[in-house]
Structure formats: C-alpha cells, structure tokens
Image: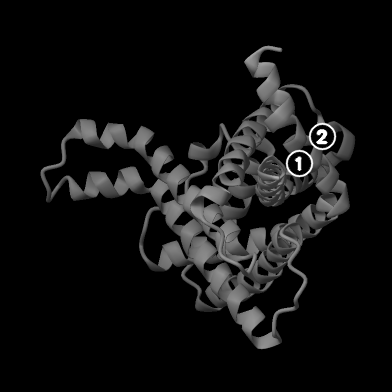
Amino acid sequence: MSRPVHIWKRDIFPVIQNLLKRFFQDEVGRSAAALAYYLLFSFFPFLIFISTLISFLDLPPLSTSTFQSLIPSDIIEIINSYLSHIEGLKNGHLLLFGLFFTLYFSMRAVDCLTRAIRRAYRVTEQKVFPWHQIQVLLYTVSLIILIFASLLLMTIGRTVLTFLAKFLPIHADSINFWNIVRFVILAVMLFFALSFLYSFVPGKRQSLRQVLPGTIAALVSWLIFSIGFSYYVEHMAHYSVIYGSIGAIIVLMLWLYCTSATLILGAELNCSIANKNKMKRKMWVHTFSAKRK
C-alpha cells in the first residue's frame, strides 16, 4: 500500500467520516438555519448603524466594489440600494435605532453560534444567566468592532493613505500595494477572530494548535464557497426569474446559511480531529501496556 493511500485511510478518512456523523448528530443544519435567521435580521440595522456612524465621523461612504468577487451581485445590489437611502444622514435617532437592533439580533446570532460550538465540544453544563448574557454581549461588541474595522480597512484604507501622504513621506507605490496587502490583513483578522471563538467558547480553553485545523478549514472553505457561489448566481442560477422581486433576499439567505454552516463545521472539525487523536493515544497506551506484559 502506497504511503498517500495509507495516510488517507489512517488519518484523513476517519476524520471526514466522523465529521459527517457529527453533522447530523449535532443538527448542524438546524443550528446554521437559526444563526442565518438572526444574521439576516441584524444585517440591515448594521448597515444603518455603520453608514450613519461613518457620516458622523465625516469619513468617505462605504464602497461595495471591493467585495464584488466574494459576494453575489444580487446581494451587492441590495446593499447599494439600501445605502443610497441612508448615506450622508447625520441622524442621532437613526444611529441609536441601528445600534440597538444590531446589538439585539447580533447577540441572538452569537448566542446561537456559541451554543453550537459548545454542543460540538460536548459541553453540557448551563451557564449562569447574567454571566452568559454578559459574555455574549462582549463577544458581540468585539465582533462588531472587528467587522467595522475590517470594512474601514477594505473600503477607505486607500483613501486614508492618500490623505496621510500629504503630511507623511508615503510613496505612491505603497498606496497601490495596499490593494493587495489589505486582503492579507483582513484574512489575519478573521483568522484570529475565529481562533478566539473556537478557543474560549467551549469553556475549557483550547490551544491554538487544537483550533488551527478548523479555523483554516473554515476560512478557506468559506472563501472558495463565496467565490463559487457568486459565479453560480451570476452565470447559472436565475433566482430573479424564479422568485421575482425577492430573488435577491433568497440569495442573501442562502449565502448566510452556508456561511453559518461553515463556521459551525470548523468547530466540529476540531472536535473530530481531537477524537481521532484521543483514540490513537488510547491505542498506543494499550499496545505499550500489552508489550510490557
């Protein structure tokens, strides 16, 4: 038997088999649907909050052109249409409205995600009510700040560098190089955000080595899915013909659902690998004990 085949049968296939089993056992599809539901309801208040906050800070408006290769054009059209009505508005009531509903629905989404991750790690004890809500709130605020920073990084980073070039010795090539570097920085930020969730949510802290496979798999699979899904929607699927005016919402819901499933499966993959390693250690101990006898 060749070495690649042996590695496949010994290491990779058992993990995939266990991952598929856990997908149905832990009801990943149902958890992803609940998470996508709350993400959908937090999506538009978040756009209101971010756009209004940017107006108060006198920053350039959000641009969606950066995300056209990652997000289906139907979703981009929804965002652009929505932003066209609220861009430039300096309304304190609108800002508070967006903040309140962003926090409310985002907290529900984060709660769904944390419960799914804890289920993957077989954590059964219930969190005390006040502490659990405070923990979810902290996770939510941290993620909102991260997303806001990522949006600023992706959309107005070049504008900020151009502005700073008037006062600092920043070369023009550095500004052009930013178009590539920003994606690397964004990937690093997402990597640490996912690693943080997979490490601390289960209760017992997981090391970076333990959460690394699921984090990388979740990021890479989400990136491949988003690009593939965008291509499929734009060149093959005809949701607007089938669903009419709500076709774009259907596309958004599908994209959110698959994104949610990817996040949960990252934790499930970490647990599958951990189970395989535990079984290998037990077999090694059993073999060693048998040899000593």
Residue at mark 1 = 251
Tell me the quarter of the picture where residue 70 sits: top right
Q: Which residue lies furthest to the top in this view?
A: 2
User: Where is residue 189 drawn, in percent x and y?
Assistant: 45, 50
Q: Do the residues labelled 2 and 1 touch (CB within 8 Å)?
A: yes
Q: In what element is the residue under mark 1?
A: helix
**Which is more toward the observer, 131 or 18?**
18
Residue at mark 2 = 239
* CA neighbours of label 1 inside 10 A, class few (<14), some (14 to 19), many (20+): many
Of badges 2 and 1, the one in the foreground is 1
Q: Residue at x 35, y 37 (%)?
A: 181
> How many angstroms separate mark 2 from mark 1 (CA)?
7 Å
Left or right of 237 on screen, residue 211: left
Q: Residue at x 52, y 56 (%)?
A: 207
The reply to whether residue 61 is visible in this rendering is no
Q: Residue at x 87, y 48 (%)?
A: 24
Tell me the quarter of the picture where residue 227 sits: top right
User: Where is residue 132 drawn, in percent x and y?
Assistant: 66, 79
Q: In what element is the residue under mark 2?
A: helix
Q: Residue furthest front?
A: 293
**Which is more toward the observer, 235 or 36?**
36
Q: Which residue is drawn at 67% across and 74% down?
A: 104
Amino acid type of disc 2?
Tyr
Tell me the quarter of the picture where residue 291 sits: top right
Mark earlier in primary sequence (2, 1)? 2
**Which is more toward the observer, 148 or 110?**
110
Left or right of 281 on screen, residue 166: left
User: Where is residue 27 drawn, in percent x and y?
Assistant: 85, 54
* CA neighbours of label 2 inside 10 A, class few (<14), some (14 to 19), many (20+): some
